[in-house]
Image: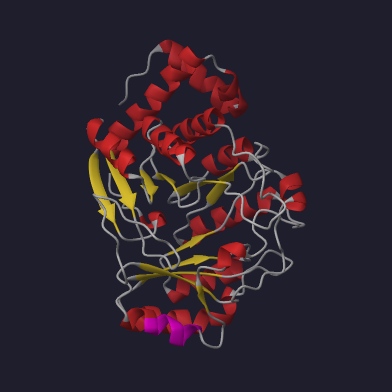
């Protein structure tokens, strides 16, 4: 068992009841809580740090430690091409542009071509309809055939799906499902143009857990125009029945969108949310995913992830890798999507 002093234990109890209190802690007190977060990582995960560099299309990445992977790795496929009905304010479909442009009718052919070129995994996504659903069920038979006939990992980024569709994905043998969980109905309506409630996505996580479908929800920090709106609530709701992996990403303003010129979410706020996530999810991997603003901000965010006891980072900077080594982390490097982090403890 981990030893926790009375003062830290008292603060942790307050934070679990009201997670927003972590934002109000004085720096010295917060440092104690962040130290505890790193202790959690050491205790449950033996201080192992996972660095992921999947060879997604449109991603140019390499460091001294992690050379560029050309074909072997994960390929991302959009089954709707660049089309998306939601046109969320933070994306407007731009995140589909770098993916392999496919369709339900040609998905299987495109997937097999990726395999022929050495891919070890696929991230299958696409634009959403007005209900917030990517038309994954239109390729369910193809997914099942590919999984039955080939040794390949398949992850689905689905948007909202009903329980019956989750059961079909489980039967098809996919390796995991990902979707965004937002804790603010106002953000869903205003930014995502979506008439849904945050609890629907939490119920979807619970449905996946109940049927044994690996689930890796994403929480976008700063989705509400760079401000923190429902992130605390999202983490608290998910912590009641933890998923397989939690992936944290940070809003990246995209060119030619309504949020193009917003300021990044303050680093201090992001750091405290990282620490909160580690506290709320002590026994599952908590990852810093692909999306994070570039430049000095990215460097400081990745440092915060290390100091807050997160388990891994996608596309890390070399400076981050060097810092992890200085901290005595045991490095593991993968060319897979970070949601497939090893769960061994």
Magenta stretch, residue numbers: 107-113
Residue 8 coordinates in the image, percent (x, y): 44, 16
- Side of 338 relative to 182 (left or right): left
- In depth, the one of 322 and 233 nearer the eye is 322
Residue occupying the point 36% across, 61% down: 54
- In depth, the one of 27 and 253 nearer the eye is 253
Residue 46 coordinates in the image, percent (x, y): 25, 37
Type of colouring: secondary structure
The image shows residue 51, relative to residue 235, as above or below, that is below
> Is residue 63 visible to the viewer in this orientation of the structure?
yes
Residue 315 coordinates in the image, percent (x, y): 38, 51
Q: How many marks?
A: 0
Question: Which corner quadrant holds the C terminus?
Answer: top left
The image shows residue 37, relative to residue 189, as above or below, that is above
Q: Residue 166 lies in magenta, yes or no?
A: no
- In depth, the one of 187 and 291 nearer the eye is 291
Residue occupying the point 60% across, 19% down: 24
Magenta region, main secondary structure:
helix
- Side of 277 relative to 199 (left or right): left
- Side of 216 relative to 317 (left or right): right
Residue occupying the point 76% across, 57% down: 193
The image shows residue 168, relative to residue 178, as above or below, that is below
> Is residue 46 visible to the viewer in this orientation of the structure?
no
Question: Which corner quadrant holds the N terminus?
Answer: top left
- Side of 48 relative to 193 (left or right): left
Residue 266 coordinates in the image, percent (x, y): 58, 32
């Amino acid at each position: 068992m981990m030893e926790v002093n009375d003062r830290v234990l008292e603060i942790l109890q307050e934070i679990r009841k009201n997670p927003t209190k972590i934002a109000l802690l004085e720096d010295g007190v917060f440092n104690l809580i962040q130290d505890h977060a790193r202790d959690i990582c050491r205790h449950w995960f033996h201080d192992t740090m996972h660095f992921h560099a999947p060879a997604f299309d449109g991603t140019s990445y390499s460091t001294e430690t992690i050379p560029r992977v050309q074909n072997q790795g994960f390929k991302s496929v959009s089954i709707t091409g660049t089309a998306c009905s939601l046109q969320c304010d933070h994306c407007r479909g731009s995140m589909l542009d770098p993916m392999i442009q496919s369709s339900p009718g040609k998905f299987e052919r495109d997937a097999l071509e990726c395999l022929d070129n050495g891919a070890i995994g696929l991230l299958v996504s696409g634009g959403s309809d007005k209900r917030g659903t990517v038309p994954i069920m239109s390729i369910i038979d193809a997914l099942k055939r590919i999984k039955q006939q080939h040794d390949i990992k398949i992850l689905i980024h689905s948007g909202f799906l009903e329980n019956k569709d989750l059961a079909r994905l489980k039967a098809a043998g996919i390796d995991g499902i990902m979707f965004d969980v937002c804790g603010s109905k106002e953000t869903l309506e205003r930014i995502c143009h979506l008439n849904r409630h945050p609890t629907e996505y939490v119920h979807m996580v619970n449905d996946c857990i109940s049927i044994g479908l690996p689930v890796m929800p994403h929480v976008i920090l700063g989705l509400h125009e760079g401000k923190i709106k429902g992130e605390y609530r999202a983490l608290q709701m998910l912590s009641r029945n933890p998923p397989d992996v939690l992936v944290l990403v940070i809003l990246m303003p995209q060119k030619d969108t309504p949020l193009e010129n917003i300021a990044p979410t303050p680093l201090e706020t992001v750091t405290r949310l990282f620490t909160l996530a580690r506290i709320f999810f002590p026994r599952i991997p908590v990852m810093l995913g692909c999306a994070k603003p570039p430049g000095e901000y990215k460097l400081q965010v990745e440092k915060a992830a290390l100091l807050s006891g997160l388990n891994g980072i996608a596309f890390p900077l070399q400076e981050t890798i060097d810092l992890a080594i200085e901290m005595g982390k045991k490095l593991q490097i993968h060319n897979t999507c970070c949601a497939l982090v090893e769960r061994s403890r």
